C-alpha cells in the first residue's frame, strides 16, 4: 500500500509566492497536497496555478480556505500587512518569514489574540535545497507544540524539521545564530580570496583548501560549548589566546603586503587583544563571548 492511500494529505494555504514560497508550494503540490496560494502581486502566483494550486484573490480568502496557513513573506511587517483583514480564528498559522526572536514572540501573541495557534519558523535552506532531502536543508520551528505535532508530517514535506521549543522566539534565535556564524565564515573566505588575488593562484584551486580547513576547524565549536558550560576556559588549551594574538600580527602584515584591507579581520582581533590585556592570555578563544555579552558590561 502506498503512503498516498494511507495518509490523507492536509490541505494548506501558502501566503507569498516569492522565490522561497514558490519552492515550498511546489513540494507540497508534488506530494499531493491541495494548496491555495496568495501573492500580493498576483502574476507571481500564476505559474503555480498551472501546477495545480488554487489562487486566492485576497489573503483573507486564502486564509478562509484552509485551517493550516503558512506565510512566507519578505519580513515581519509584510506578515502584519497581509493578514490585517483576515479572520484567523481557529487557524493554525505557521510563519516561515525570517524575523527576530522578539518579532516571533510578538507575532505569536498577536496570532493568539486573534484565535489562532502559532508556530514560527526559520528556514535553514535556499530555494534549490527545498524538496531535496539530501541537501541537508531544514526548518527550525518554535511555538505551539500541539500545532507542530499535528502538522509535523506536512511541514516535513519541503525540508527537515527541528523543533526548537515552545518559546516562539527560539526558531528565529537559532536561525539568526547560525546565520551570524555563517557571516563570519564568509567574511574570512572573502579575505582569503582577496589575499591571493594579486598572485597567479586560481581561486578555484584555493576553494577546496578553504573548504577542507574550515571543515576541520568547525568542530572547535563543540569544545567552546563545553567550556562555556563548565566556565573553565583554560584547561587543556592547545592554542592559547596570547599565542593567537601574536599570530594576528602576521595575518595583518600579510594583508599589508598583499594590499588587502584588514577591515574584516580587525574587529575580532581587537576583542582577542582586549581579553589578553585583561590577563586571559592562557585561555583559548572562548572568553571573547564574555566581551560580547552586553549584560555583563
Ligand atoms: P522574495 O523577495 O522572492 O519574495 C518576497 C515575498 O514577500 C513576495 O511574495 C512578496 O510579494 C511578498 N511581500 C513583500 N512585501 C509584502 C507586503 N508588504 N505585503 C504582502 N506581501 C509582501 O523573497 P523569498 O521568497 O526569497 O523570501 C521569503 C522569506 O523567506 C523571507 O523572510 C526570507 O528571509 C526567507 N528565506 C529566504 C531564503 C532564500 O534564500 N530565498 C532562505 C531562507 C529564508 P510580491 O511578489 O508582491 O512582491
Image (cartoon, rainbow, N blue to C red):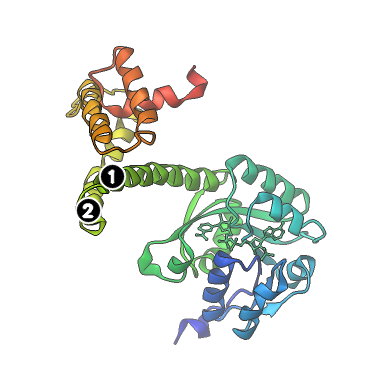
Q: Which of 116 and 196 is in front in this view?
A: 196
Q: Mark 2 highlights which residue? A: 206
Residue 42 lies, in percent from the top left, at 72, 73
Does label 1 or label 2 sit earlier along the sequence?
Answer: 1
Q: Nearer the viewer, residue 145 or 292?
A: 292
Q: Mark 1 highlights which residue? A: 192
**CB atoms at circles 1 and 2 under 8 Å apart?**
yes
223 lies above or below 97: above
> What residue is at 59 percent from the left and 84 percent from the top?
51
Give the quarter the ligand 1 occupies.
bottom right
Residue 261 lies, in percent from the top left, at 35, 36
123 lies above or below 22: above
Residue 234 lies, in percent from the top left, at 24, 22
Q: Nearer the viewer, residue 289 or 254?
A: 254
Dot 1: within a 10 Å radius of its alpha carbon, few (fewer than 14), some, or many (20 or more) residues? some
Residue 65 lies, in percent from the top left, at 74, 73
Question: Which of the 4 image quadrants contains residue 262?
Answer: top left
> What residue is at 53 percent from the left and 78 percent from the top?
7
Q: In this view, does 17 lie to the left or right of 61?
A: left
Q: In this view, does 85 lie to the left or right of 195?
A: right
Measured in 3D between alpha carbons, the distance from the residue under mark 1 to the one under mark 2, in whole angstroms, is: 9 Å
Under tag 2, what secondary structure?
A: helix
Amino acid at each position: 500500500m502506498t503512503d498516498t492511500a494511507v495518509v490523507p494529505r492536509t490541505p494548506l494555504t501558502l501566503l507569498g509566492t516569492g522565490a522561497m514560497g514558490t519552492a515550498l508550494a511546489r513540494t507540497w503540490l508534488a506530494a499531493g497536497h491541495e494548496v491555495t496560494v496568495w501573492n500580493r502581486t498576483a502574476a507571481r502566483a500564476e505559474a503555480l496555478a498551472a501546477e495545480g494550486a488554487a489562487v486566492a484573490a485576497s489573503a483573507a480568502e486564502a486564509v478562509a480556505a484552509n485551517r493550516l496557513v503558512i506565510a512566507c513573506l519578505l519580513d515581519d511587517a509584510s506578515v502584519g500587512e497581509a493578514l490585517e483583514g483576515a479572520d484567523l480564528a481557529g487557524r493554525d498559522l505557521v510563519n516561515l518569514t525570517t524575523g527576530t526572536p522578539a518579532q516571533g514572540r510578538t507575532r505569536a501573541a498577536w496570532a493568539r489574540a486573534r484565535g489562532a495557534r502559532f508556530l514560527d519558523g526559520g528556514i535553514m535552506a535556499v530555494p534549490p535545497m527545498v524538496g531535496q532531502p539530501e541537501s541537508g536543508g531544514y526548518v527550525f520551528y518554535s511555538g505551539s507544540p500541539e500545532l507542530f505535532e499535528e502538522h509535523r508530517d506536512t511541514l516535513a514535506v519541503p525540508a527537515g524539521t527541528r523543533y526548537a521549543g515552545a518559546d516562539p522566539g527560539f526558531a528565529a534565535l537559532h536561525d539568526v545564530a547560525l546565520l551570524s556564524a555563517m557571516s563570519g565564515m564568509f567574511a574570512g573566505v572573502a579575505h582569503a580570496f582577496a589575499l591571493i588575488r594579486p598572485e597567479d593562484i586560481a581561486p578555484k584551486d584555493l576553494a577546496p583548501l578553504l573548504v577542507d580547513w574550515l571543515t576541520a576547524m568547525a568542530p572547535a565549536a563543540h569544545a567552546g560549548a563545553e567550556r562555556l558550560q563548565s566556565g573553565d576556559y583554560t584547561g587543556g588549551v592547545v592554542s592559547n589566546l596570547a599565542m593567537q594574538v601574536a599570530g594576528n600580527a602576521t595575518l595583518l602584515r600579510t594583508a599589508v603586503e598583499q594590499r588587502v584591507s584588514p577591515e574584516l579581520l580587525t574587529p575580532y582581533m581587537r576583542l582577542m587583544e582586549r581579553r589578553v590585556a585583561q590577563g586571559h592570555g592562557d585561555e583559548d578563544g572562548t572568553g571573547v563571548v564574555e566581551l560580547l555579552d552586553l549584560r555583563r558590561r
